[in-house]
Image (tube, grey):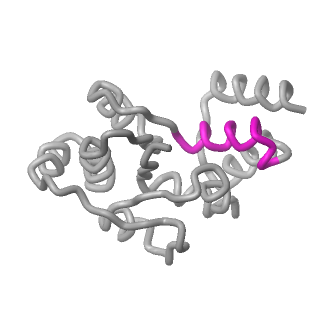
């Protein structure tokens, strides 16, 4: 199983819809950096471990183009031989992908949870995110509806 390394946005979004446990159900263990822990600002459950990248230079280089949480997350993932990086920011996702990292996002996690039967109704979770002020493009919503229907 890969090292699952998360940025702050996923933690915030899953916390907002009371679905934090999905991460534990899917991955058993998730890694965040101290920077992400600070940005999140809430206590973290035991299944989330804090680890920092060894190469501070990588973090500083990435901070030239990304925020600190995203930079530290990507830098840590680059040090892992096998990682899955959870990022929602489009720019950060593109950079991670260009660096050869496997990525997913909060919506990908919710979709996987639906496919595996961890959550019943994907659209309900997405609606809840939107009620909390999260913008989701129409094309992504269309894909989510397909996943929700195909797994009913």
Q: Quadrant of residue 142?
A: top right
The residue lying toward the viewer, choosing from 1 and 116, is 1
Q: Quadrant of residue 112?
A: top right
Q: Residue at x 67, y 50 (%)?
A: 129
Looking at the picture, does residue 48 appear above or below residue 104? below
Question: Residue 104 at x, y = what percent?
Answer: 50, 37
Seen in the image, is 145 located left or right of residue 87? right
Question: Residue 30 at x, y = what percent?
Answer: 48, 57
> How many numbered badges does the structure rendering display?
0
Q: Residue at x 66, y 62 (%)?
A: 21
Question: Residue 87 at x, y = what percent?
Answer: 44, 43
> Which quadrant holds the C terminus?
top right
Q: Give the magenta range.
A: 105-119
Looking at the picture, does residue 129 appear above or below residue 38? above
Question: Residue 31 at x, y = what percent?
Answer: 42, 58
Q: Residue at x 60, y 37 (%)?
A: 108
Looking at the picture, does residue 149 appear above or below residue 65? above
The residue lying toward the viewer, choosing from 119 and 51, is 51
Q: Residue at x 14, y 46 (%)?
A: 58
């Amino acid at each position: 199983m890969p090292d699952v390394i998360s940025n702050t946005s996923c933690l915030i979004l899953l916390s907002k819809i009371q679905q934090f446990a999905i991460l534990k159900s899917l991955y058993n263990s998730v890694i965040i950096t101290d920077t992400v822990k600070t940005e999140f600002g809430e206590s973290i459950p035991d299944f989330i471990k804090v680890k920092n990248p060894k190469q501070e230079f990588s973090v500083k280089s990435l901070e030239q183009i990304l925020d600190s949480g995203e930079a530290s997350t990507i830098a840590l993932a680059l040090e892992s031989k096998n990682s899955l990086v959870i990022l929602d920011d489009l720019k950060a996702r593109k950079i991670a992908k260009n660096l050869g990292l496997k990525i997913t996002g909060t919506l990908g996690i919710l979709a996987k949870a639906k496919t595996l039967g961890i959550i019943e109704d994907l659209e309900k979770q997405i609606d809840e995110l939107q009620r909390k002020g999260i913008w989701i493009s129409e094309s992504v919503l269309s894909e989510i509806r397909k996943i929700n229907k195909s797994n009913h």
